[in-house]
Amino acid sequence: MTTNIRHAASTELLPELTRLGEHDAIPYYGNLIGGKPRPAVDEAVMASTNPARPTQILGYVPASGAADIEAAVAAAHAAFPGWRDTPAPQRGQILARIAERLHAHRDGLGRLVSREMGKVYDEARGYDVRGAAALAEYMSGEGRRFTGVTSPSETPGRMGFTLREPIGVVGLITPWNLPVLTPGQKIIGAIMCGNTVVLKPAEDTPLTALLLAEIFQEAGVPDGVVNVVTGRGGEAGQALVAHPGVDMISFTGSTAAGRTIGGVAGSLLKRVSLELGGKNAIVVLDDADVQLAVDGAVWGGYASNGQRCTASSRIVVDRRVAAEFTDSFVARVRALRVGDPLIEGVQVGPLVNQAALDKVDSYTRIGLSQGAELLTGGRPVPDAAGGYYYQPTVLGNVAPTDRVAQEEIFGPTVSITVVDDEDEALQVANGTEYGLSMAVYTRDASRGLAWVHRMEAGMVYLNAPTIGAEVQFPFGGIKNTGNGHRETGPSVIEQFTEVKSVYLDYSGQLQRTGFTLD
Ligand code: NAP
């Protein structure tokens, strides 16, 4: 394998992937460490496959372990002083070039996302890649702000202010569902603040991560500032979290993995940022524009096949409009076109892998066993190529405490719970362990604003579904969705910097602070 290693350069990778299936040679891509492609130290490999045609191997990548993490952390440390000392406006200029390169590679990167994790091409190109480009644009300006605080000193002849400084080497661990935007937003935020990073992407989307890092290099990010080590969470991921040379862990993924990672990183006194699961509700009040709510529920529930942390997986609807909403919603869901995500007009692609397909199907059975009614869907879609397709599914008559209303399914399954009044709607909507995103539909702006205050979520929407976050606003949740950090928007700076308080005394004498006000 090592003799066959190739750099996952964007110019090479994209034509290679578009030709797959037409020739025998399956490319092998190395980790990106210190700007160079490297195989795993023990030469172990794993395959990245196409969920629409699971026998199609898109490429091989290293199945890395602790030794590879060691090398990547060393490269990140070596690059750190130079990057830290690069003036923030210059780092911002590189981010502007990253934005430009991401826009230039939107089609190819979008196609790779569709191939590797099954999201329809328009969403891959339009939201995932474009979102990362938009964040790079936004953060490039931050290079000329990067502001601190100045306050008057209580002591004469003295002034004080704060500086923002990078934390050091940041370990990034990401899931597969937004394989450009999530690694992209972490890398962009971390390097803007002067940190260097080691990314361990999800094992289902390693090629996208490698290509993303190549694009960053193409934009002028120096060697060693962004390192990528592919592999499994239980091996490369755990090694990254436990490595003493990693100063911070920024993790996005399931609440279960977040608890473990938060525990290990916390015991090592590392800063740890956790962006975890969601069980997001759309609330349809009795005065809602019902058709607008149906539009929102279809988009929020089934975009990316329901595989978004912010997916609208629960509908909480007032009994007075429940029949109208449900009839229209179910008809629209039945009409969704399922198929290969690269075919134009397809609205729902395959799930990411067999385990996801099994999980989604098992939740249909769990829902039915607890008394839910299957309104549409509920079965895998037979496919000659073995693609992991599942029928867009609606479960009605779901009680708020049912498992399908409480647990994250992460697939094309939406549950409907009917409530009698607004108080019950709020109680049901807020009644899960998660607090990521929530939406309310009402024609009454005052009522909507009251809901804005009462919804327990980090992001709330009025008359729009629970997906659709924009990069200039903080992204993240409360309760078991995270540990209080926010990604994107100005909050990125808080996440990825240390604050240093600076006192300058120009009085020429010892001044005992605290005594000067007596
Ligand atoms: P996951 O199983 O938690 O995995 C996420 C990442 O962590 C993967 O790279 C995984 O590696 C790695 N990992 C797993 N266990 C680990 C451990 N003990 N130590 C170190 N690394 C570990 O989540 P997923 O299934 O990929 O993604 C879906 C989840 O992400 C959902 O819960 C979704 O809500 C959440 N999510 C949250 C947000 C947000 O911003 N709040 C955004 C997107 C997704 P492998 O790939 O090898 O398993």
Image (tube, rainbow, N blue to C red):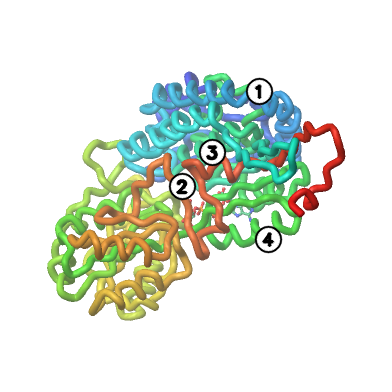
Looking at the rendered structure, the kind of residue marked 4 is Gly
Circle nearer the N terminus (1, 4): 1
Which is more foreground, mark 3 or mark 1? 1
Q: Residue 486: give its label.
A: none
Find out whether the residues at labels 4 and 3 contact each other: C-beta distance under 8 Å.
Answer: no
> Residue 12 appears at what percent x and percent y?
49, 20
Which is more foreground, mark 4 or mark 3? 4
At x 39%, y 78%, the residue is 401
Which is more foreground, mark 4 or mark 2? 2
Query: How far separated are the C-alphas under marks 1 and 4?
Result: 34 Å
Question: Disc 3 marks which residue?
Answer: 206
Circle nearer the N terminus (3, 2): 3
Looking at the rendered structure, the kind of residue marked 3 is Pro
Front position in the image: 397 or 165: 165
Is the C-beta of the residue carrying label 2 under 8 Å from the nearest atom of ligand 1? no
Question: Disc 1 marks which residue?
Answer: 86
